[in-house]
Image (cartoon, rainbow, N blue to C red):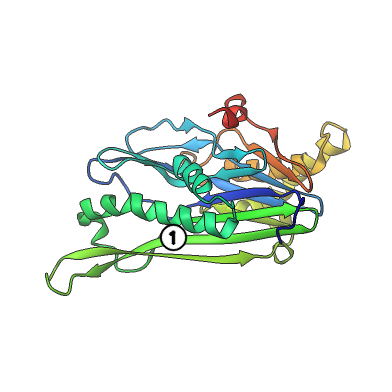
């Protein structure tokens, strides 16, 4: 797909579905996160909420989950995004490292490198907290990632999945060791119906709003439509995406897991990754 002189916009979306409590002496910062992608012929919009929480605090942090890696590249994270303690790691730092270490910036290679770094970072955490992880007898999804490009010719997307199982030690009975797995495969926007939602267990609420599947969702859609009809919304697609995500945040079962400001990034064919709407501090992501 890469051709001389062709302009590409690249994005990486990270999501994690299952969370661990405090791991040994480590302090886990996790994000329930709702990540929503809106696909159009000439652009992609990416939205994420702002809550980051830990078991040690009842007050969530307000963080930037979407991060541009350069003018054409972004990364958005959720789940166990960072750990403080004997075995610290930060998902955002791992994403920057993965992107810098793959000279070609080829998406499938970046996804694989990110997965390798996640495994390397999490291995000592799992080994040091066997009291928790030793109870895992079925595959446990640790993290996932979506990588994609958009050029004048269309979109290209990949999904990466990382997880672990605890295998019994064949020599030392009653002892276990972590076995990590990872997968990467393509995603086709044409199969998504124009919108995809990842992350939070309440993510179906976004699709309730989009498909008008419930009476509360229909009421929320009417409120949004009235704002559009009065000319208050300059970009209908952006306002629709924001309203759909906000509907989940307003009705989520766990208000600590998701919430806060909804940041939105736009990727346009032949252009760059630009902020459509975001917290002020998020717009300084390329200065770090």
The residue most toward the top is 280
Q: Quadrant of residue 198?
A: bottom right
Q: Quadrant of residue 247?
A: top right
x and y percentages locating residue 59 in the rendered image: 42, 30
Residue 278 versus residue 188 in the image, above or below: above
Q: Looking at the image, which is closer to me, 105 or 269?
A: 105
Kindly identify the residue that appears in the image at 75 percent across and 41 percent down: 238
> With 249 as the anchor, is 155 left or right in this view?
right
Kindly identify the residue that appears in the image at 54 percent across and 39 percent down: 65
Q: Looking at the image, which is closer to me, 199 or 207?
A: 199
Kindly identify the residue that appears in the image at 57 percent across and 67 percent down: 185
Residue 275 versus residue 79 in the image, above or below: above
x and y percentages locating residue 64 in the rendered image: 54, 34
State whether residue 206 appears in this view. Answer: yes
**Residue named by callout 1:** 162
The residue most toward the left is 172
Badge 1: residue crowd in 10 Å (few <14, some 14–19, many ≥20): many
The quadrant of the image that shows the N terminus is bottom right
Residue 10 versus residue 53 in the image, above or below: below
x and y percentages locating residue 91 in the rendered image: 44, 44
State whether residue 32 appears in this view. Answer: no
> With 225 as the anchor, is 242 left or right in this view?
left
Kindly identify the residue that appears in the image at 71 percent across and 51 percent down: 38
Q: Quadrant of residue 236?
A: top right
x and y percentages locating residue 48 in the rendered image: 59, 42
> With 265 as the anchor, is 285 left or right in this view?
left
Residue 154 versus residue 29 in the image, above or below: below
Q: Secondary structure at mark 1?
A: strand
């Amino acid at each position: 797909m890469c051709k001389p002189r062709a302009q590409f916009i690249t994005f990486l979306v990270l999501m994690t579905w299952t969370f661990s409590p405090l791991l040994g002496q480590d302090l886990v910062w996790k994000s329930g996160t709702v990540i929503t992608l809106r696909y159009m012929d000439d652009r992609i919009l990416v939205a994420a909420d702002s809550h980051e929480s830990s078991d040690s605090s009842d007050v969530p942090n307000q963080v930037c989950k979407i991060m541009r890696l350069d003018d054409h590249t972004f990364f958005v994270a959720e789940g166990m995004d960072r750990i403080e303690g004997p075995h610290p790691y930060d998902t955002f730092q791992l994403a920057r490292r993965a992107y810098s270490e793959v000279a070609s910036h080829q998406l499938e290679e970046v996804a694989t490198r990110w997965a390798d770094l996640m495994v390397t970072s999490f291995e000592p955490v799992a080994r040091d907290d066997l009291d928790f992880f030793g109870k895992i007898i079925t595959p446990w999804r640790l993290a996932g990632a979506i990588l994609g490009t958009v050029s004048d010719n269309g979109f290209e997307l990949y999904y990466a999945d990382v997880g672990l199982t605890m295998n019994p030690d064949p020599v030392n009975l009653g002892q276990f060791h972590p076995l990590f797995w990872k997968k990467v495969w393509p995603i086709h926007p044409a199969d998504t119906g124009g919108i995809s939602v990842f992350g939070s267990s309440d993510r179906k609420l976004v699709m309730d709003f989009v498909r008008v599947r419930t009476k509360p969702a229909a009421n929320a859609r009417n409120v949004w439509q009235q704002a559009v009809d009065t000319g208050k919304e300059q970009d209908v697609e952006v306002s629709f995406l924001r309203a759909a995500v906000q509907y989940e945040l307003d009705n989520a079962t766990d208000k600590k897991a998701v919430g806060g400001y909804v940041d939105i990034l736009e990727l346009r064919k032949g252009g760059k990754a630009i902020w459509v709407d975001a917290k002020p501090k998020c717009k300084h992501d390329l200065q770090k």
